[in-house]
Image (cartoon, rainbow, N blue to C red):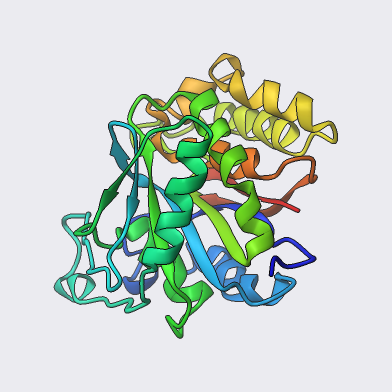
């Protein structure tokens, strides 16, 4: 039986690499993000039956859903201490949810394949080790379509929206600012895009929100903040799943001096 109260759709920052498992200078660099993720479960109206994650670290030709009942780990980063390649997040997968995702996407005319070998990448295990540390909730990953077409990903979110009333938490995992080569001293320009993105994601009219996010590349300083939009695309899925529910910024911080934001719909 579907839940009366839908779970929200989220767009969150997953930090950088195995960010919560190593030392940084300054040492409190990721503390605000850690507190946000640590408290996130308590803000939900109910414990999810399962989680569907669209990570900025998986792109395929056509959408692809992870179908393994026991997904392995995928350490898709390099140059970090040895212990970060031993991190574990043994949450189960859910072939049942994967089948439901395929049903919804294909029903909306969107191709969706399956991958029974894909492991949890760090866009999943890094934040979810903090959100649900017990690893007792099934987690399924859905890829981005490699074209990064905003409309395509909005349509995917719209197709997946019924999952919110079925006890599934839909999460876009990325970063609202993702330019590792952004010039130091350019924080003001980065802030211009962050302010635009927040206004767009939180616009009270969902049709205006949709239109503005679809045209994100024309926003001021857009390509400085997102030269390759892999970490922004998960937002389109979350916003698409929002329907008419309002959006709000529920995380705001500066990482490496640059503004980052996270959003909640519903």
Compare residues 20 and 55 and report the one nearer the observer. 55
**21 horizontally vs 11: left or right:** left
**View extreme (right): residue:** 204
Q: Residue at x 58, y 65 (%)?
A: 32
The picture quadrant where one finds residue 218 is: top right
**174 horizontally vs 165: left or right:** left
Q: Position of residue 194 (x, y in %)?
A: 62, 35
**25 horizontally vs 214: left or right:** left
Q: Residue at x 84, y 31 (%)?
A: 205
Q: Position of residue 28 (x, y in %)?
A: 49, 68
Q: Is residue 51 above or below residue 235?
A: below
Q: Position of residue 30 (x, y in %)?
A: 48, 64
Q: Residue at x 33, y 76 (%)?
A: 89
Q: Quadrant of the N terminus?
A: bottom right
Q: Residue at x 40, y 61 (%)?
A: 140
Q: Is residue 17 visible?
A: yes
Q: Is residue 86 above or below residue 52?
A: below
Compare residues 107 and 64 and report the one nearer the observer. 107
Q: Is residue 14 visible?
A: no
Q: Position of residue 219 (x, y in %)?
A: 61, 18
**View extreme (top): residue:** 218
**196 horizontally vs 131: left or right:** right
**Tag count:** 0
Q: Is residue 86 above or below residue 61?
A: below
């Amino acid at each position: 039986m579907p839940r009366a109260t839908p779970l929200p759709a989220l767009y969150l920052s997953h930090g950088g690499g195995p960010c919560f498992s190593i030392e940084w200078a300054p040492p409190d660099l990721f503390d605000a993000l850690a507190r946000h993720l640590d408290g996130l479960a308590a803000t939900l109206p109910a414990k999810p039956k399962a989680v569907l994650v669209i990570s900025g670290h998986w792109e395929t030709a056509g959408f692809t859903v992870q179908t393994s009942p026991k997904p392995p780990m995928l350490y898709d980063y390099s140059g970090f201490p040895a212990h970060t390649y031993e991190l574990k997040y043994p949450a189960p997968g859910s072939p049942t949810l994967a089948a439901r995702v395929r049903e919804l996407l294909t029903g909306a005319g969107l191709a969706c394949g399956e991958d029974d070998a894909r492991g949890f990448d760090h866009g999943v295990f890094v934040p979810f080790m903090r959100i649900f540390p017990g690893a007792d909730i099934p987690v399924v990953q859905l890829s981005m379509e490699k074209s990064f077409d905003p409309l395509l990903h909005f349509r995917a979110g719209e197709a997946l929206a019924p999952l919110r009333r079925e006890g599934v938490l839909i999460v876009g995992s990325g970063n609202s600012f993702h330019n590792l080569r952004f010039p130091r001293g350019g924080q003001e320009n980065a802030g211009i895009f962050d302010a635009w993105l927040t206004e767009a994601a939180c616009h009270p009219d969902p049709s205006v929100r949709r239109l503005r996010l679809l045209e994100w590349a024309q926003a001021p300083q857009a390509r400085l903040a997102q030269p390759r939009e892999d970490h922004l695309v998960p937002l389109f899925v979350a916003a698409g799943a929002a329907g008419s529910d309002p959006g709000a910024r529920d995380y705001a911080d500066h990482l490496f001096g640059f503004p980052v934001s996270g959003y909640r719909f519903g």
